[in-house]
């Protein structure tokens, strides 16, 4: 089976201020096939989000390659890139920013369908099903995001991911702006999605406790590199790298 | 939008409306044509010629009315063309970036750097004097300013997550530009449009006054030009020849300017009023608050804050709270539980429609509700300091962090800078970064800067609203440790507001759990964490399993927090409570110091 996402010796260097190069990611290699769950863990600024954006072709690699379903994103046309993007769905960190304030919840959820050219008449049912699946009342569909709490907004973002039926969901710290009490909800919803569509999940977080429950595999990043990668329970019970230990100590009470 | 800017907007719309009415009903309001002789020369005002006639016997009232048509149509047409061109250029330049952006922006710079009025005059002489030529030329120089400003906005908006999200979903160019970027430009776009209209009106009048306008139509500028040529200022004729078009021009331009002003505030809203309301203070005279007890610094008694919207939101209800000297009080609750409102009310930073409807806030022996805006401002920083939510993103981007800290230290400039360096080192920022700008620092570092500003005047009480949200766990831990060590070093009390019970629970001495605007449980942190007495606290603790220990599924709290604009009878937590029984649905449990019927029995 062709992996849905593959990074080969991926590296990104940004040209920073005063022409000092900033290395965002170095020599990253991993593959993800359907049904797999990978948690990418690390402190802020270690390059986790760069990887997420690169997977969607929003950041071009300086070295190495990003392959989506076997297609090198560096050598596809804009049209192909758009259609490859539709097979991956990203859930962003801040639901106060990732939802267009001028669109109703229904339209927001239906946007991925509109992009996939699903006729409007067919969208209604799919959108309503998605609202129910993420535990939101259907009446909420006619509201604007301003009228929703942070938790409700992030559910809308998940509903949008759900209707898109992606092969891979990339969740970039989806709970870090939300109440701690919503972390459990997020895990439940993501695993539902995985069960239904056999979706692969790339979960980006700084919280090892969260990573433990969303990733079968945990990859720990530090300074742009993956410094430790292995089965979740193993990484947590016997961390090998100081970066992992630091992350672990921060969440032990 | 604030009340004052609503008034300004209304006046502006009224002014422009008057001119618009004159333009629309010109043929009804006068029977004389504006540009052909309809009477004798220099007639005084009469019933037939309301403003008299000019040197060629043309009706001046008619010129005034029909002039409105020209001014309005030139103003609007030029503004429409200029903003449309400006927007298109801004979208292309801002979204595409790179060479396209560089080339387009150099063109914009070129247009902006040219002497604007002179340029139009030269072009008018060159291209002819028809009205459409005038419009095109005015638009041709006016588009550059909106283009530059809107491009800046496009650069900002295209990084908004919903735009990136649309791109990530594989959306096409038109969808991204039209549906995601353009709507976010409208506030700026509308204020730029109004400005362009006002400038176009002025320029058109100027051109006409100089005698370079369309010779076949009589605009206000042309009327003034004729008056000037006939030396009307030297005779009595100026009263109806110069004054009316002058006033009309002023009304139109002031009208546009007022609308533009209001539109700008709409585009960039800021908080305008602070402090406790006057009405409350009058009531207070009769009910003086008793001072805080020994070993207490902040005492909140029976505090209720409402947002006076329709329907009103009961953000907090009868909150009792005190910080004990030298201790950290952690206030924990979900979003919407009223914890930030409470913090803002304590600090006197509550903005309307928020209002304290009942209760006391006492700091030491000072009743904070009695102080006016000035009194509170004096106290803020010295007696107590607030680190508001998301403060780290509110630092001034163009001032170095050292100068920003120095500014809050209320010292002479030189001493202030030295002291600022000490403070920055104290909060853990390397000396070689003290002259950095906020954007050069990570979120955690910026939060340290904000803390340095807050402790600059050694407050007795530090209130930190969600100081670690959005930061990674290691940074969170470091910041909490920093607050802990500052607390003992400066002997201050700390109130930390957070949604993360485990995180705050690890450093707090006391914990207050808030739910639906009320304190659900209050006690020593160790006791609350070890044996929570309120079912809500218990659920919060179990909502997520710890990182070590046996694997067990997280137990999400069912349901959502209640809508605080709906007053339900009974315990506010009852609909979500696993231990609910009959009494819970009937009465609100008293707070003793656990607001639960189970604890009372």
Image (spheres, coloured by chain):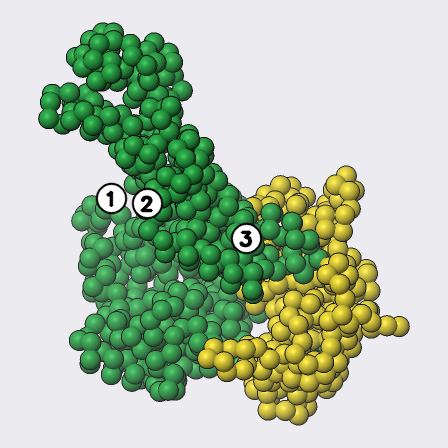
Numbered tag placed on residue B156 in the rendering: none
Q: Earlier in the sequence, mark 3 or mark 2?
A: 3
Q: CA distance from mark 1 to mark 2?
A: 53 Å
Q: Position of residue A190 (x, y in %)?
A: 72, 64
- From the viewer's side, name the closer residue of B582 and A143: A143
Q: Chain of mark 3?
A: B
Q: Nearer the viewer, mark 1 or mark 2?
A: 2
**Residue depicted at x 44% and y 44%:** B140
Quarter of image, res B580: bottom right
Q: Nearer the viewer, mark 3 or mark 1?
A: 3
Q: Chain of mark 2?
A: B
- From the viewer's side, name the closer residue of A69 and B293: A69
Q: Indicate whether A103 appears above or below B430.
A: above
Residue A137 falls left or right of residue B437: right
Q: Chain of mark 1?
A: B
Q: Which residue is mark 1?
A: B279
Element at label 2: helix
Element at label 1: helix
Q: CA distance from mark 3 to mark 1?
A: 49 Å
Element at label 3: helix
The quarter of the picture where the N terminus of chain B appears is top left
Residue B375 falls left or right of residue B168: left
Q: Callout 2: 10 Å neighbours few (<14), some, many (20+)?
A: some
Q: Which residue is mark 3?
A: B91
Colour representing chain A: yellow
Quarter of image, res B555: bottom right
Q: Which residue is mark 2?
A: B117
Q: Callout 3: 10 Å neighbours few (<14), some, many (20+)?
A: many
**Residue depicted at x 34% and y 75%:** B401
**Residue depicted at x 65% and y 84%:** A26
């Amino acid at each position: 089976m062709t992996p849905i996402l593959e990074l080969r010796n991926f590296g990104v260097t940004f040209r920073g201020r005063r022409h000092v190069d900033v290395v965002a990611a170095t020599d990253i290699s991993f593959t993800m096939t359907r049904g797999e769950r990978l948690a990418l863990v690390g402190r802020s600024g270690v390059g986790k989000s760069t990887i997420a954006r690169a997977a969607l072709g929003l950041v071009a690699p300086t070295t190495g390659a990003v392959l989506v379903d076997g297609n090198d994103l560096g050598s596809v046309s804009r049209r192909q890139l758009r259609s490859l993007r539709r097979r991956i769905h990203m859930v962003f960190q801040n639901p106060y920013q990732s939802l267009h304030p001028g669109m109703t919840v229904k339209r927001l959820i239906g946007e991925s369908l509109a992009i996939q050219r699903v006729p409007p008449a067919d969208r209604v049912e799919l959108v309503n099903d998605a609202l129910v699946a993420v535990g939101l009342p259907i009446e909420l569909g006619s509201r604007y995001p301003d009228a929703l709490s942070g938790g409700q907004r992030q559910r809308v973002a998940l509903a949008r991911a759900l209707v898109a039926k992606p092969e891979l969901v990339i969740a970039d710290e989806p709970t870090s702006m939300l109440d701690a009490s919503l972390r459990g909800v997020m895990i439940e919803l993501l695993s539902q999605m995985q069960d239904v569509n056999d979706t692969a999940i790339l979960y980006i977080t700084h919280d090892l406790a969260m990573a433990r429950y969303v990733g079968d595999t945990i990859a720990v990043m530090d300074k742009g590199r993956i410094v430790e990668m292995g089965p979740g329970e193993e990484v947590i019970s016997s961390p090998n790298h100081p970066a992992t230990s630091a992350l672990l100590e921060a969440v032990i009470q | 939008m604030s009340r004052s800017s609503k008034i300004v907007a209304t006046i502006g719309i009224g002014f422009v409306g008057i001119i618009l009415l004159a333009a629309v009903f010109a043929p009804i309001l006068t029977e004389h044509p504006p540009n052909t002789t309809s009477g004798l020369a220099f007639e005084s005002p009469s019933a037939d010629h309301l403003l008299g006639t000019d040197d060629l016997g043309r009706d001046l009232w008619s010129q005034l009315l029909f002039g409105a048509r020209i001014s309005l149509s030139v103003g609007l047409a030029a503004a429409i063309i200029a903003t449309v061109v400006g927007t298109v250029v801004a979208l292309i330049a801002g979204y595409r970036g790179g060479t396209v952006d560089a080339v387009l922006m150099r063109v914009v710079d070129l247009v902006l750097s040219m002497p604007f009025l002179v340029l139009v005059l030269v072009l008018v002489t060159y291209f002819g004097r028809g009205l459409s030529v005038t419009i095109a030329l005015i638009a041709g120089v006016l588009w550059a300013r909106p283009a530059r400003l809107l491009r800046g906005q496009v650069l900002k908006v295209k990084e908004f997550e919903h735009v990136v999200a649309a791109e990530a979903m594989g959306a096409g160019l038109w969808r991204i530009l039209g549906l995601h970027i353009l709507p976010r430009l409208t506030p700026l776009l509308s204020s730029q449009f109004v400005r362009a209209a006002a400038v176009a009106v002025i320029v058109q009048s100027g051109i006409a006054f100089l005698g370079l306008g369309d010779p076949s139509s009589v605009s206000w500028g042309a009327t003034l030009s004729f008056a000037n040529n006939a030396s009307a200022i030297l005779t009595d004729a100026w009263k109806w020849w110069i004054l009316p078009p002058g006033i009309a021009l002023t009304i139109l331009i002031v009208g546009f300017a007022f609308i533009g002003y209001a539109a700008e505030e709409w585009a960039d809203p800021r908080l305008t009023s602070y402090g406790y309301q006057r009405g409350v203070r009058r009531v207070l005279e009769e009910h003086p608050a008793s001072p805080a007890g020994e070993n207490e610094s902040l005492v909140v008694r029976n505090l209720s804050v409402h947002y006076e919207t329709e329907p009103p939101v009961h953000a907090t209800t009868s909150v009792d709270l005190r910080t004990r000297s030298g201790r950290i009080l952690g206030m924990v609750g979900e979003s919407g539980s009223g914890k930030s409102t409470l913090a803002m009310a304590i600090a006197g930073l509550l903005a309307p429609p928020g209002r304290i409807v009942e209760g006391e806030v006492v700091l030491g022996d000072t009743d904070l509700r009695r102080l006016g805006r000035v009194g509170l401002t004096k106290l803020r920083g010295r007696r107590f300091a607030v680190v508001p939510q998301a403060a780290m993103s509110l630092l001034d981007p163009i001032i170095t962090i050292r100068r920003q800290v120095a500014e809050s230290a209320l010292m002479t400039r030189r001493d202030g800078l030295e002291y600022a360096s000490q403070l920055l080192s104290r909060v853990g920022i390397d000396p070689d970064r003290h002259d950095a700008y906020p954007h050069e620092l990570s979120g955690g570092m910026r939060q340290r800067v904000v803390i340095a500003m807050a402790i600059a005047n050694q407050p007795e009480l530090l209130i930190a609203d969600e100081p670690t949200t959005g930061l990674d766990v290691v940074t969170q831990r470091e910041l909490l440790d920093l607050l802990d060590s500052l607390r003992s070093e400066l002997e201050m009390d700390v109130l930390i507001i957070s949604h993360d019970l485990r995180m705050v629970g690890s450093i707090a001495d006391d914990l207050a759990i808030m739910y639906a605007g009320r304190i659900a449980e209050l006690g020593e942190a160790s006791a609350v964490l070890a044996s929570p007495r309120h079912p809500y606290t218990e659920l919060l603790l179990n909502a997520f399993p710890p990182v070590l220990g046996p694997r067990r599924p997280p137990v999400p709290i069912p349901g959502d927090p209640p809508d605080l604009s709906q007053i339900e009878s009974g315990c506010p937590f009852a609909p979500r409570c696993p231990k609910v029984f009959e009494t819970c649905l009937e009465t609100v449990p008293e707070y003793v110091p656990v607001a639960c019927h189970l604890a009372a029995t």
